Image (spheres, coloured by chain):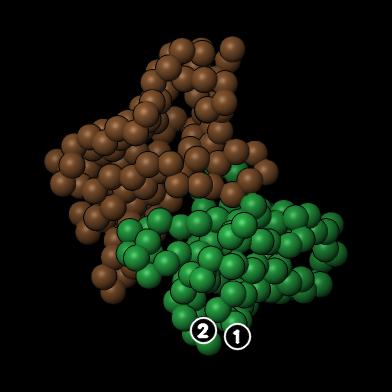
Amino acid sequence: QQQVKQSPQSLIVQKGGISIINCAYENTAFDYFPWYQQFPGKGPALLIAIRPDVSEKKEGRFTISFNKSAKQFSLHIMDSQPGDSATYFCAAFTGGATNKLIFGTGTLLAVQP
Amino acid sequence: DGGITQSPKYLFRKEGQNVTLSCEQNLNHDAMYWYRQDPGQGLRLIYYSQIVNDFQKGDIAEGYSVSREKKESFPLTVTSAQKNPTAFYLCASSTSTSGRTGELFFGEGSRLTVL
């Protein structure tokens, strides 16, 4: 119930292509879904986030698509660039008394020039 | 510049020794967190603290201890009781607002290797 399942574990995309990372959850109490980007040897940084009452959120080349009924959400990186090569973590947050952030297992993205 | 400073960046420890990882923030954030990162396992919460002099266990607290004597500081001690301490340790913080949405600000991490 508390897990967030993330796939794929690794992804190789050509420069200019679309990178897609998928996540799924079970707990309907989750009410906020952030994505974090982590470069090697660094800490993760918040990339983009969405609430479950919104089906899509776009910030530049990054888009989150959210399917509440399927309990799935995904990150799309359009026009992928070598500088996007990093590990991406989806996460799910439940506030209130629980106040807990659950991370997916991460996707290592490599964008080839 | 405001941020979270973790030290040391790399640390080697012999089995049976305790080691303390430092985490300092000058963001004036109320909440602070310690996560452990292992390949293929994502980030797992060790301890967190919402206010000074108070902290709670996360999902994998066994073998770890923390203190929160100052708002700016949240050191993590990896004790000899931790069975598999080799990992990348991340400290994070959040404001009272960002903490309600899971928006965390992370340090650059400390890599601990047990020899």
In the image, the chain rendered in brown is A
Residues B31 and B80: in front is: B31
Question: For residue B5, which quarter of the picture?
Answer: bottom right
Residue linked to disc 1: B69
Q: Earlier in the sequence, mark 1 or mark 2?
A: 2
Q: Looking at the image, which residue is at 81% across and 72% down? A: B17
The location of residue A93, given as percent across then percent down, is 33, 57
Residue A63 sits in which quadrant?
Answer: top left
Kindly give the residue lying farthest to the front in the view shown. B1
What secondary structure is found at the residue carrying circle 2? loop
Evaluate if marks 1 and 2 touch, with contact meaning CB atoms under 8 Å apart: yes
Give the chain of mark 2.
Answer: B
Q: Which mark is residue A6?
A: none
Q: Quadrant of the N terminus of chain A?
A: bottom left
Element carrying mark 1: loop
Q: Position of residue A82 (x, y in %)?
A: 57, 21
The residue depicted at 52 percent of the width and 53 percent of the height is: B43
Q: Residues within 10 Å of mark 1 (few under 14, many from 20)?
A: few
- Amino acid at circle 2: Val
Q: Position of residue B36 (x, y in %)?
A: 58, 58
Measured Cα–Cα span from mark 1 to mark 2: 6 Å
**Image height check: is A107 above or below A4?**
above
| Label ID, residue B52 | 2
